[in-house]
Amino acid sequence: MLSFALLAIAAVQPIDRTPEQARGVVQRYYAAIERGDYHGAYRLWSGKGQASSQSYAAFTRGFARTAHTRVVAGAPIDGEGAAGSVFITVPVRVYATLKNGRHQRFAGQYILRRVNDVDGATREQLSWHLTSATLRPIG
């Protein structure tokens, strides 16, 4: 009985397909980092973290000095399709506080990708994932 209920819930959960849902992925990424859920944040990158260009250990070490982080994600910029994929750009401002109390601010963008609606694509492939980030420090 329980497994049927779980299947019913999974069947109604939406797949992240819209530009606004791409923005939500960026927000979930920073919410996971804020909670210390580095595994969850890492898995939001394409290839279950591989697109971050870091091992999971290196990814985690990158936040060792961070006490808090938050993101202000702007309106998604419609992307283009290519070879069965859809890409979208989400502009961001990132605010971080280090454990020593120092504040950091960054501006830039994330590019997200999902598989276009093709036969046989999995729920994970149809949902947005981070593929690259360009962030620069701001004063």
Image: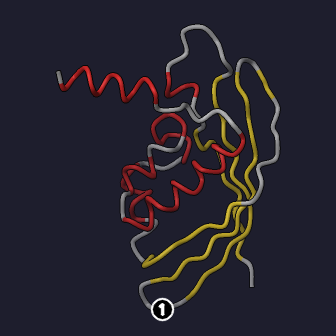
Task: In this rendered view, identify the residue nearer to me: 74 or 99.
Answer: 74
- Identify which residue is drawn at 64% across, 24% down: 115
Residue located beneath label 1 in the image: 101
Q: Residue 83: percent from the left, percent from the top?
A: 75, 18
For the C terminus, give its image quadrant.
bottom right
Q: Residue at x 36, y 64 (%)?
A: 36
**Which residue is at a point 39% across and 60% down the rendered structure image?**
60
SS for callout 1? loop
The image shows residue 30 at horizontal and vertical percentages of 52, 61
**Residue 97 placed where, x, y %?**
51, 82
Q: Quadrant of residue 46?
A: top right
Q: Is residue 64 left or right of residue 137?
A: left
Please state the total of marks drawn on the protein image: 1
Extreme left residue here? 1
The colour scheme used to paint the residues is secondary structure
Q: Residue furthest bottom?
A: 101
Rendered position, 86 above or below 73 = above
Within 10 angstroms of label 1, few (less than 14), some, or many (20 or more) residues? few
Tell me what residue is drawn at x 44 percent, y 90 percent: 100
Quadrant containing the N terminus in the rendered view: top left
Report the amino acid beneath label 1. Answer: Gly
**Residue 72: x %, y % from top left:** 66, 67
26 lies left or right of 12: right
